[in-house]
């Protein structure tokens, strides 16, 4: 451990003593711990580790910077569809798009990136962090020097699901009881528990309903699947092929119900898939009802070819190994799988999962077809006690070492593979430059347990993603809250490789926290939790605003069908229509966020403006400023005007916005209430030609710098030391 880390550990221990003596409040303790670099660590884990004398370990973990050549996103599979509603024609995105977030390390040590594909009802967050606030596999892989691409499969996370496009939502929202009984040590208490789940020791908590770690896990669960399954597999294969066409050859790592993804893409792009890691895949049982063609629902390329399922003759194998059920493989002579024969495949199984002890059936099926496949059991590599969600458990780094050891041993760059010599980061132009972060990750706030007749579900959870620069230059965090039917990606830029306001603030030394509001982006929506949902957003609902901008700074052409507009439209979320419920839940979650991170600046956009006023009204002591970008005023909101007098306020308006006429009245109402308000017209600061979506337009860095100038003039650091 470095001297810097030793100092951080010593200071944390001293801070903890002051907390236990009652000299520092819990909120102040957590805020100061974050300032020391212990960000993204849940309160329960932080305090529990300190009780056990674990400050040095925490300091060592917190001290590893992440140096990124690039952090950005894009959607693949964005397709327009025309339809008629109420007699009117409209153009929409058809709902098969797939979100991809990526991290490129400053020093890329491995030729091929890793594509991470989540399982079941989850989303890409399964790979990005742990329920107790530690770094997830995506960050650990970046530390090792792998480029990482994290997928939200169609209908999950940032790839919006809508009943008008995908059919009804599942009849039941994810239940705490069900997930506890399947993924945590509570599985050992179930009547049908096998001998393996009783060995589960690595879950970061008890797994009981009500435990904070279980809540953090279930908060990400959406469970909205494209059906029938064959349609989902068609979308996975098509989107995965487009992804590899874009980024080049890669290793695909899948989990659970996402297991078939890699095999499907390998059939479509055999030269681009350099290795497959299938972690407890749902396709481990060949020729089942869910895998009629072998390990997928879709027909692979067999040699000799087949035209119908009945052409494949099968036989049953009854293993002697305890816990392994009989499985089917081809009868001899077996057909080969030529598209997979050059791709190494590992089926990874934990010691203490419902999937234990291994996947011999899937391996036998592939080997029989001429594929290099391996049954990789963690227990045989000396890693014990893991369940199905091994990537988020206490020893997740040890599990990953087993997996990456297999990758580096079995996946070798081709001598004629130009991608290996030209890492993805070198092919893009990033207008922000590299990011050096002390930490990045996520957590959930505002999750409220709700009892239903079928179990306990969560309502109101909001996804918070954070970027902590290695060198913090501004003392107060900035919280970015998106508008209308959007999600926090509005602050990431538009079109992969183009930076956004989140990058610019982090590079300037701000701690950045981004929010996906209730029911948006990675904050799952289900009608049992949030009520009805608005119709699908069409292109016309947003392109009019883009078209207002000066053509020299406009996003692409600003019109439907432009590739950049397609990228924007792919992330548009329909909105929960119960406004009163949404406002209550966002306010509660926003307050919880501020209590966790300390006094902050709120920057809101458009319809998100209302939530900024409501949060600030509840906890003005935790607000350093409110910046309302193209948002409404306080009229019609139940806010305490007296609270809003306690910090500076800026109303930011673009030169060519359709909302410019509404700003003067909103500003005047706050001035009449005694608030310190700035009518911040971008044109007065030399930022010209913008529309409502200024954070996405060509001069977005200029608009961000103008806002930063106002912050650094009007928001002063606290000078008094608090006990």
Image (cartoon, helix red, strand yellow):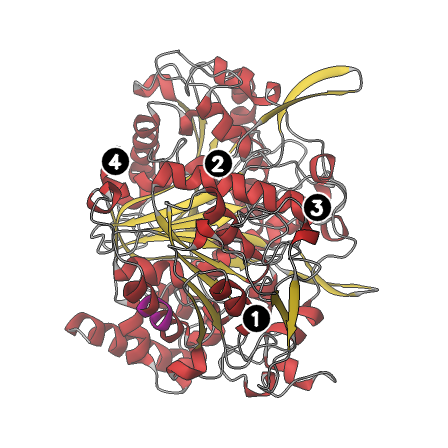
Which of 532 and 276 lies nearest the eye of the viewer?
276
Q: CA distance from mark 2 to mark 4?
A: 18 Å
Q: Is residue 671 magenta?
A: no
Q: Main secondary structure of the magenta part?
A: helix
Q: How much space separates mark 2 and mark 3, taking CA atoms?
A: 20 Å
Name the residue beneath numbered marker 1.
361
CA–CA distance in space, label 4 to label 3: 37 Å
Quote the CA–CA distance across marks 1 and 2: 33 Å
- Disc on the earlier residue, 2 or 3: 2
Is there a contact, CB below 8 Å, between mark 4 and mark 3?
Answer: no
User: Which of label 1 and label 3 is nearer to you?
Assistant: 1
Does dot 4 land on a helix, a strand or a loop?
Answer: helix
Looking at the image, how many numbered discs can be counted on the residues?
4
Q: Is residue 403 above or below residue 207?
A: above
Instruction: Mark 2 and mark 4 in contact? Answer it, CB < 8 Å.
Output: no
Return the residue at label 4: 427
Q: Which mark is residue 76?
A: 2
Residue picked out by circle 3: 227
Return the disc, 4 or 1, that comes first in the chain's sequence: 1
Callout 4: 10 Å neighbours few (<14), some, many (20+)?
few
């Amino acid at each position: 451990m470095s001297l810097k880390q030793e100092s951080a550990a010593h200071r944390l221990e001293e801070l903890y003593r002051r907390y236990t003596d009652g000299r520092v409040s819990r909120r102040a303790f957590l805020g100061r711990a974050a300032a020391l670099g212990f960000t993204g660590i849940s309160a329960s884990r932080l305090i529990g580790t300190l009780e056990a004398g674990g400050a040095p370990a925490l300091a060592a973990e917190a001290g590893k910077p992440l140096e990124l050549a690039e952090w950005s996103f894009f959607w693949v599979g964005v397709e327009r569809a025309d339809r008629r509603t109420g007699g009117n024609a409209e153009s929409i995105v058809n709902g098969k798009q797939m979100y991809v977030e990526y991290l490129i390390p400053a020093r890329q040590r491995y030729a091929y990136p890793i594509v991470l594909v989540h399982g079941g009802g989850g989303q890409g967050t399964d790979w990005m962090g742990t329920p107790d606030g530690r770094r997830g596999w995506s960050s650990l892989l970046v530390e090792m020097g792998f480029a990482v691409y994290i997928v939200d499969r169609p209908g999950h996370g940032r790839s919006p699901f809508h009943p008008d496009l995908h059919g009804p939502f599942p009849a039941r929202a994810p239940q705490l009881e069900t997930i506890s009984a399947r993924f945590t040590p509570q599985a050992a208490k179930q009547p049908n528990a096998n001998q393996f789940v009783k060995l589960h020791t690595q879950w970061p908590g008890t797994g009981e309903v009500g435990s904070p770690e279980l809540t953090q896990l279930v908060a990400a669960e959406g469970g909205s699947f494209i059906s029938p399954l064959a349609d989902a597999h068609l979308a996975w294969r098509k989107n995965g092929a487009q992804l590899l066409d874009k980024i080049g050859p890669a290793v695909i790592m899948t989990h659970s119900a996402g297991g078939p993804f890699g095999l499907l893409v390998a059939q479509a792009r055999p030269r681009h898939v350099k290795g497959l890691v299938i972690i407890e895949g749902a396709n481990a049982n060949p020729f089942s009802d869910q895998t009629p063609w072998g390990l997928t629902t879709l027909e692979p390329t067999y040699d000799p070819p087949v035209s119908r399922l009945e052409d494949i003759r099968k036989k049953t194998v009854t293993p002697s190994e305890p816990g392994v059920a009989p499985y089917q493989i081809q009868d001899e002579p077996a057909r080969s799988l030529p598209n997979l024969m050059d791709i190494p495949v590992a089926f990874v199984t934990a010691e203490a999962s419902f999937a234990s002890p291994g996947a011999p059936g899937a391996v036998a099926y592939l080997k029989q077809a001429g594929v290099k496949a391996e049954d990789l059991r963690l227990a045989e590599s000396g890693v014990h006690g893991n369940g199905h969600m091994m990537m988020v458990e206490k020893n997740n780094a040890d599990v990953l070492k087993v997996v990456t050891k297999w990758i580096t041993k079995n996946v070798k760059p081709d001598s004629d593979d130009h991608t290996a010599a030209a890492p993805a980061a070198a092919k893009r132009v990033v207008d922000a430059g590299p990011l050096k972060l002390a930490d990045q990750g996520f957590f959930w706030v505002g999750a409220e347990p709700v009892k239903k007749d079928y179990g306990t579900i969560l309502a109101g959870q909001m996804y918070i993603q954070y970027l902590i620069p290695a060198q913090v230059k501004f003392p107060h965090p900035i919280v970015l809250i998106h508008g209308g039917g959007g999600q926090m990606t509005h602050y990431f830029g538009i079109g992969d490789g183009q930076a956004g306001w989140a990058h610019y603030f982090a590079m300037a030394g701000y701690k950045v926290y981004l929010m996906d509001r209730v029911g948006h982006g990675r904050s799952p929506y289900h009608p049992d939790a949030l009520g009805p949902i608005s119709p699908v957003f069409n292109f016309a609902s947003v392109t009019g605003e883009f078209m207002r901008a000066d053509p020299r700074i406009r996003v692409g052409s600003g019109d439907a069908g432009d590739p950049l507009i397609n990228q924007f439209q792919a992330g548009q979320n329909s909105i929960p229509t119960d406004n009163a419920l949404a406002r209550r839940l966002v306010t509660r979650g926003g307050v919880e966020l501020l209590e966790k991170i300390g006094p902050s600046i709120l920057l809101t956009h458009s319809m998100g403006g209302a939530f900024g006023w409501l949060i600030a009204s509840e906890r003005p002591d935790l607000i350093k400023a409110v910046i309302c970008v193209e948002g409404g005023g306080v009229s019609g909101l139940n806010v305490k005007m007296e609270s809003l007098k306690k910090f500076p306020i800026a109303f930011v308006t673009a030169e060519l916005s359709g909302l410019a006429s509404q700003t003067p009245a909103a500003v005047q109402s706050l001035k009449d209430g005694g608030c310190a308000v700035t009518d911040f017209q971008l044109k007065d600061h030399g930022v010209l030609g913008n529309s409502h979506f200024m954070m996405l337009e060509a001069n977005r860095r200029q608009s961000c710098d103008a806002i930063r100038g106002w912050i650094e003039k009007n928001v002063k650091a606290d000078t008094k030391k608090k006990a």
